[in-house]
Image (tube, rainbow, N blue to C red):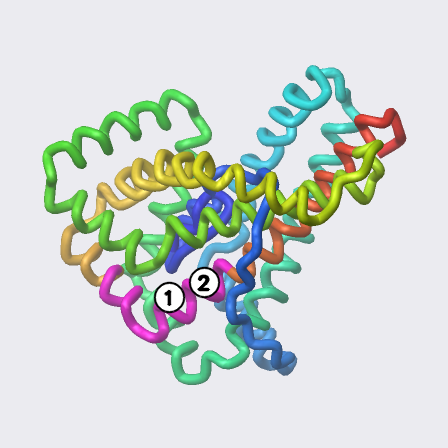
Amino acid sequence: MPLSRVFPAVGLVLAVALAPLGAAPVRAEGVVTQIPSPVDAARISRLADTMLMNDIIAVMRDEGVDYGRTLATDMFAGKAGADWDATVALIYDPQTMRRRFDTGLAAALSGAGADLGAIEDFFGSERGQTILRLEIEARRALLDKDVEDAAKLAWEDLRSADDARAQRIFRFAEVNDLIESNVMGAMNANLAFYRGLSDSGAFPDGMTEDQMLADVWGQEPDLRAETEDWLFPFLSLAYQPLSDDDLDAYIAFSETAAGKQMNAALFAAFDTVFTRISNDLGRAAGKQMQGEDI
C-alpha cells in the first residue's frame, strides 16, 4: 500500500511518503461525503489497526522531525532552536495524526459496502500482515542515508537487467497510480505550506493564490523525479523477501474494486493529514521568520 513518502497505495508503502512534504496542488479525490455512523467509525478504526497504522505513523513522525531539521537549516540558517524543535514535534503528534487519519479514512470508505470485507480479509491475512510489516521495515530502514543509497543502486541493477521482478514492481506502481498520486499529494502539501506562510504574514508584499499555485506547479517536474527516485528503490527493498506468488497476489488485489477503493481512501486520508501538517508547518515557519513566539 505504498503511500509514498507523503502518501500510500494499497499497502502501505505510503511511499508518502516520498518526500515528507513541501508545498502543494490540487486534485481533490472523489471522497464520499456521507458521514459514517459510530459503528462504521469503530470498524474503520479496527481496520486502521489491522493496517498497523500506529507503526506507520511512528515512522512518518520520525521523517517529519527530520524534515523539521531540514527546514530549520534551509529557512533559518539552523538557528531555530529548541522552540522550533518542540513545535515540529507537536505538529507531528502521533495521536493527532492517527485521529485525523481515522476520520479521513472513515469518510473515504463510508460507501465501500461489501468491498470493506474484502479489504479486511486481505490485509488481516498472514500474507497481508507480512506485506505491511515489510513495507514499514523498509521505510524505517530508508531513514538511514547509507541504506537509501544502497537501495537505489540495487534498484538500478534490477532495472538494468530488465528482471521479471522489476517488471512486477513497475506494474504494482502503475496499478496503484503511485507516481501521480504521490506527486499530487506532495503538491497539495506544498500549497498548504505556502498558505500557512501567507497566513502568518511571512510575505511582506503579499502572495496571491495564483502566484502560489504557479510556484507549486513549477515544482512538479522536480517532485515527479524525486518521487520516482525514492519510490522504486523503496518498493524493491520492501518486497525483496516476498515470493513472486505473494507479490502477484498483492498486484491482483490492487486491481480489484476493493483494492482500488482502499488505495484511493488511503491517499485521501493521508492527504487530509499531511495538508494540515504542512499548513501548520508553514504558519510556524512564518512566525519563526518574523521572530514571533511559536
| Magenta segment | 251-267
Q: Which residue is mark 2?
A: 50
Magenta segment includes 252: yes
The residue located at (54%, 52%) in the rendering is 54
On-image quarter of the C terminus: top right
SS state under label 2: helix
Crowd rating for badge 2 (residues with CA inside 10 Å; few <14, some 14–19, many 20+): some
Ranked by sequence position, the earlier of labels 1 and 2 is 2
| Quadrant of the image containing the N terminus | bottom left
Q: Is residue 61 among the parts visible in the rendering?
A: no
Position above or below: 270 against 258: above
Q: Position of residue 27 (x, y in %)?
A: 53, 59
Q: Amino acid at mark 2?
A: Thr
Residue 221 position (above or below residue 178):
above
Q: Residue at 44%, 54% (x, y): give it.
A: 181
Tag 1: amino acid: Gly
Tell me where residue 57 appears, x and y as whole percent. 55, 48
Determine crowd level at label 1: few under 14, some 14-19, many 20+ residues with C-alpha closer than 10 A.
some
